[in-house]
Image: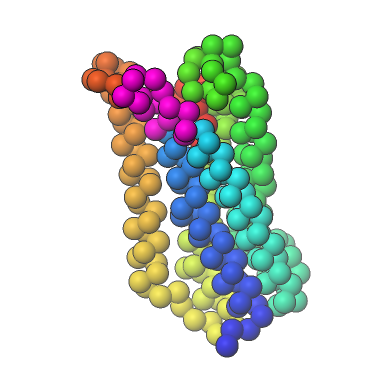
Amino acid sequence: MLSSHDALAAAHAACACIAVLFTIPLALLAARFKANSTPNGKSSSSWFRWHVVLNTLSVLLIILAFGLGMGAVATANAGTQYSGPDSDIHHKLGLSVFILVLLQALLGALAHFTRGRASDKHGTNGTGKHWSRKLHMVLGIATLGLLYWTVWEGMHIEWPSMSSTLTETPQSVQILFWIIFLVPVLAYLIGAGTSVLCQLQPCSGHYHQAPLLQGNAKV
């Protein structure tokens, strides 16, 4: 039977892992491969709907994970753990990425509503280069990187040291983390590499990748 602290911590970890390992990477990949053309040569706008839905779900999961984490800390009567003797890197990272995720949501909305004149309704075409779009893209990648670090700290250091039973995260779970982590990272790098090649020489057929820092890209 899990203690109140461990039950809340486990729920916190589950919400965070769903967001960090699945919904956020999928939202990022939807934006990365957004310029893939349909057979008629036109760029599909379905990526934008997926990007919005997945990111909205991700924000809700991160808010829930943050609240559950705060609840777990409260049951241990250890304050907020953002400062003082009980403070650690997991809690500081958690607060930082929580703020960044909310900022990213606002930037995403700003990027969409400041599309360039040549862009279509969903920002899938055109060359609009409002600063919020590039910032949203770069900050999105950085935020996901910090989220990966936060989850790893939670599994590898926080749980073994703070759980009521002081149990280690199973090795199989840690290996699974790295496998799931590598799949979207490699997919994104392949997409980015293809984008560079397509800028150096025309891509064949209807396939086309968005430039790395195209103004209307979203992450």
* Picture quadrant where residue 52 is located: top right
121, above or below 159, in the image: above
* Viewer-side residue, 98 vs 202: 202
In the displayed structure, would residue 189 be above or below residue 128?
A: below
**Main secondary structure type of the part rendered in magenta:** loop
**Relative image position of residue 51 (x, y in whole percent):** 52, 38
Residue at x 60% of width, y 78% of height: 6
Most extreme residue toward the front is 40
Q: Residue at x 42, y 33 (%)?
A: 32
Quarter that holds the N terminus: bottom right
* Residue at x-position 57% and y-position 32%: 136
- Residue 167: x, y in percent? 49, 81
> Which residue reaches farthest top?
118
> Is 128 part of what is drawn in magenta?
no
Report the front residue among 48 and 215. 48
Quarter location, residue 143:
top right
Where's residue 7, x and y in %? 61, 77
One can see residue 96 in this view: no
Report the span colored magenta: 33-47
- How are the residues colored? rainbow
The mark total stands at: 0
Vertical relation: 31 (above or below) 122 = below
Report whether 169 appears left or right of 80.
left
**Closest to the observer, 39 or 85:** 39
The reply to whether residue 58 is in sight is yes
In reply to whether residue 37 is colored magenta, the answer given is yes
Q: Is residue 88 above or below residue 214?
A: below
Residue 38, horizontal then vertical, whole percent: 35, 26
